[in-house]
Structure formats: C-alpha cells, structure tokens
Image (tube, rainbow, N blue to C red):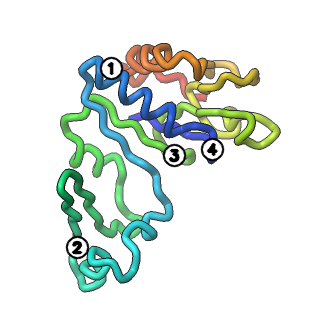
Amino acid sequence: MVAFVGHSGSGKTEVLTETVRRLTERGYAVATVKHAPALDEVDREGHDSARHRAAGATRSLLWGSADAALFWRHGGEGNLAETIERLFPDADLVLVEGWKRGPYPKIEVYRRAAARPDGPLAGEIDVAAVVTDDPVAVPDGVELLARRDPERIVVWLEERMDDPAAWTVR
C-alpha cells in the first residue's frame, strides 16, 4: 500500500489516476482507496442505503447497472490494512488517495499554487517522495519525482513494490 497525499488542489487524483492507468497497462492488478472523512455525505440520511443501516443492517450494498458500493459502520475501530487485505486479495498494489497521517509509505503531490507558502509537507510528515514540477527543497532521503514524467513515477513504484525495506521514509 502506498498513499498519495498533499494539499487540496495539488493534483493527487490526476497523478494517482495516471499512475493506475500505466500500472494496469503493464499488467498489474491495482486497487484504490480514497480517504473520505466526510463519507456520511455519500450515504446521506433519508437515502435508502442510509435508512437500511439506520434500521440495523450491518452492511448495505448499493448495486447499480455497472457499479457497486458497500457501506458499513466500522465505528472508528476498523483496521484499514486488514479490510484491504480482505477486500482486495488479488491486488498487486493498493494506492490510497489521502490520509496524510496514516501509517503507510507516502508520496506527496505538491503544487505551489495549492499549498501553504512554506512548501511541501515533506519534513512535517514522513514521505518517501515528492511529485512536483515546482522548485522545492525536501529533506535528505526524500526523492523528487517530476510531475511531467509519469513514467518515472511508475518505474519508481515498481522498483519498490516487492521490497518494503526499499522504502526510504523520512
């Protein structure tokens, strides 16, 4: 599991989706998780699935013509890693969008226009790499990856996929 983190508007989704596209073209099975602290807004009060859960259903599956979504209340006690292992057993790699305070190796997506004036989160939180096209300073051991070179981002991930010890987290 690897988390793509950064400030709102930094381009996390754009970088993550391009990375997923390139990895799947190479034959990898990639799963994604979006950290969504405001998930209750998706399953809003009054909607059928929310009413099912309010009535006591432990899980509520929304089944559309081509897509599905599963809701359940973990009460803040759920273990994301165990849940991901159970839900995505065939994934070669799970990419998480967000969750900058989470326990997984992180790649920060940084865009100066979307960030605080003092630069990337690297140094404030542990990140293995920063994806940016802006000139920035990062702590020693943190890799700089050019946003305009998505192929390099994928190769960098591939080099670390099978060896968790290869992650230099600062």
- Along the viewing direction, whichever of 140 and 66 lies nearer the viewer: 66
| Vertical position of residue 148 compared to residue 89: above or below | above
Which residue is at 27% across, 78% downward?
Answer: 48
Query: Residue 31, image x and y in percent?
Result: 31, 38
Q: CA distance from mark 4 to mark 1?
A: 31 Å
Query: Tag 2 or tag 3, which sits nearer the N-term?
Result: 2
Badge nearest the viewer, 4 or 1: 4
Kindly report the distance in space between the C-alpha atoms of the residues bearing marks 3 and 1: 23 Å
Q: Residues at badges 3 and 2 in contact (C-beta under 8 Å)?
A: no
Q: Residues within 10 Å of mark 1 (few under 14, many from 20)?
A: few
46 vs 80, nearest the viewer: 46
Say which label, 3 or 1, has the lower sequence index: 3
* Residue 129 higher or lower than 44, as above or below: above
Q: What amino acid type is highlighted by mark number 2?
A: Thr
Disc 4 residue crowd, few under 14, some 14–19, many 20+, Cα 10 Å: some
Q: What residue does disc 3 label?
A: 98
Q: CA distance from mark 1 to mark 2?
A: 36 Å
Q: CA distance from mark 4 to mark 2?
A: 35 Å
Q: Classify mark 2: helix, strand or loop.
A: loop
Q: Quadrant of the C terminus?
A: top right
Badges 4 and 3: C-beta atoms under 8 Å apart?
A: no
The vertical placement of 67 against 169, above or below, is: below
Quick check: marks 4 and 1 in contact, CB under 8 Å?
Answer: no
- List the residue tagged with mark 1: 162
**x and y percentages locating residue 79 in the rendered image:** 35, 54
Residue that mark 2 sits on = 58
- In this figure, which residue is indicated by the disc labeled 4? 9
Q: Given contact means CB atoms under 8 Å apart, are the residues at marks 1 and 2 in contact?
A: no
